[in-house]
Image: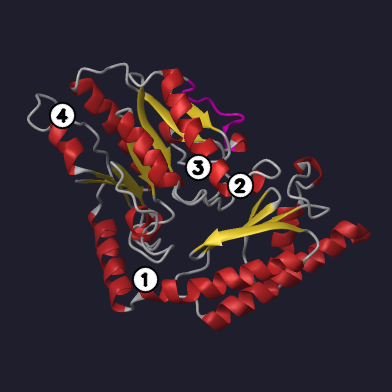
């Protein structure tokens, strides 16, 4: 079943409210905590912001601190010296299990995760992470919410990435953005039949409607967008051009201020530092992302600056030649920023 909303934040808000609603009906009123992750972003409503792990976004705003528990960074870039990816995977999965055990399974309602942490820096967890986390959730009767606001509707070459890319069937999927291709505001919380069965026939109402939820104009835009995606074979197109995009991204490692590049599908991130060291102090790197954005805009390219990173999310219709053009401009922007850092600012 889908609850239609006005965007990603309200979709996540709806998912959390439904999880709590279900536990109340099942006689488990204490089972309310949501486990999230550092650098995760889940939205701007009070509930969604409370479970978002980007510290800069949380700094000056009140939040429901008792609601959320945050797991450590899942970026493989920061694994210990000499640590294998398999060992890092086991460590990150253990973080989830230890959190559930420490908080008490009777108190933990759900684990929420973006398949790829988008605005947190396009962080791709180690292979097998989501599948292993889902198994831990099943072990302790904790629901799994997959926040696909960014990854659904083609960004990774599929309608939804959870099953097609990462091999999992979450209890709830939240989505928005590509749902209407940005032409009208709409999101959705897609809830599994199992959870709906748990609340069906009960003498209770999930009161979650508001003025513009499921707005007919947005619904029409969504239907037409999906029709065009199918007609133009855009999912197949993304799968075809994504290797070109990722190859061009990897070539940026040659630039001296680039500390790391990472991505998946048509998602990418360039992480920079003054000395090209990914472990360097961000204090001296704070302006790099903004400066790269300035240099790229001079040349006709928009990137998203996030502290010392630039996040890339090109349109799904982008061609191979346009990808090459985009990275040519980005390379020039990075090189100009390197010169700027050298004292020409």
Mark 1 closeness class: few <14, some 14–19, many ≥20 residues within 10 Å: some
Q: Which residue is mark 3?
A: 41
Residue 205's tag is: 4
Do we see residue 6 in this rendering? no
Do we see residue 157 in this rendering? yes
User: Is the residue under label 2 in contact with that under label 1 (CB below 8 Å)?
Assistant: no
The residue lying at 56 percent from left, 29 percent from top is 61
How far apart, in angstroms, are the residues tagged by discs 2 and 4?
49 Å
**Disc with the residue nearer the chain's start (1 vs 2):** 2
Residue 243 rendering spot, x and y as whole percentages: 52, 72
Q: Nearer the viewer, mark 4 or mark 3?
A: 3
Q: Which residue is mark 1?
A: 235
Q: Nearer the viewer, mark 2 or mark 4?
A: 2
What secondary structure is found at the residue carrying circle 4? loop
Outermost residue to the right: 343
How far apart, in angstroms, are the residues tagged by discs 3 and 2?
27 Å
Q: Nearer the viewer, mark 3 or mark 2?
A: 2
**Disc with the residue nearer the chain's start (1 vs 4):** 4
How far apart, in angstroms, are the residues tagged by discs 1 and 4?
38 Å
The residue lying at 25 percent from left, 52 percent from top is 215
What secondary structure is found at the residue carrying circle 1? helix
């Amino acid at each position: 079943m889908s609850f239609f909303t006005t965007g990603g934040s309200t979709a996540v808000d709806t998912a959390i409210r439904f999880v709590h609603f279900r536990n109340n009906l099942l006689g488990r009123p204490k089972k309310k905590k949501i486990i999230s992750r550092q650098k995760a972003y889940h939205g701007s409503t009070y509930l969604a912001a409370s479970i978002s792990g980007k510290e800069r976004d949380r700094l000056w705003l009140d939040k429901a601190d008792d609601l959320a528990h945050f797991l450590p960074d899942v970026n493989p870039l920061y694994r210990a010296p000499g640590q294998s990816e398999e060992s890092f995977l086991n460590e990150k999965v253990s973080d989830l299990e230890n959190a559930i055990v420490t908080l008490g399974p009777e108190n933990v309602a759900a684990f929420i995760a973006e398949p790829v942490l988008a605005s947190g820096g396009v962080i791709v967890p180690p292979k097998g992470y989501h599948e292993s986390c889902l198994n831990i959730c099943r072990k302790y009767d904790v629901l799994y919410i997959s926040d696909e606001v960014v990854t659904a509707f083609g960004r990774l070459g599929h309608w939804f990435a959870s099953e097609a890319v990462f091999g999992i069937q979450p209890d709830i999927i939240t989505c928005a953005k590509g749902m209407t291709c940005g032409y009208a505001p709409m999101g959705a919380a897609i809830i599994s039949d199992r959870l709906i069965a748990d609340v069906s026939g009960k003498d209770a109402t999930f009161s979650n409607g508001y003025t513009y939820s499921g707005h007919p104009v947005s619904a029409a835009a969504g239907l037409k967008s999906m029709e065009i995606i199918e007609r133009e074979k855009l999912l197949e197109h993304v799968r075809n051009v994504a290797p070109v995009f990722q190859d061009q991204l990897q070539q940026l490692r040659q630039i001296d201020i680039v500390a790391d590049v990472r991505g998946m599908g048509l998602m990418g991130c360039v992480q920079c530092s003054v000395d090209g060291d990914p472990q360097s102090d961000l204090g001296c790197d704070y302006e790099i992302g903004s400066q790269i954005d300035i240099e790229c805009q001079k040349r006709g390219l928009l990137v998203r600056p996030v502290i010392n990173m630039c996040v890339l999310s090109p349109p799904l219709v982008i061609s191979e030649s346009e990808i090459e053009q985009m990275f040519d401009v980005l390379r020039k922007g990075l090189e100009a920023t390197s010169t700027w850092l050298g004292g020409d600012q």
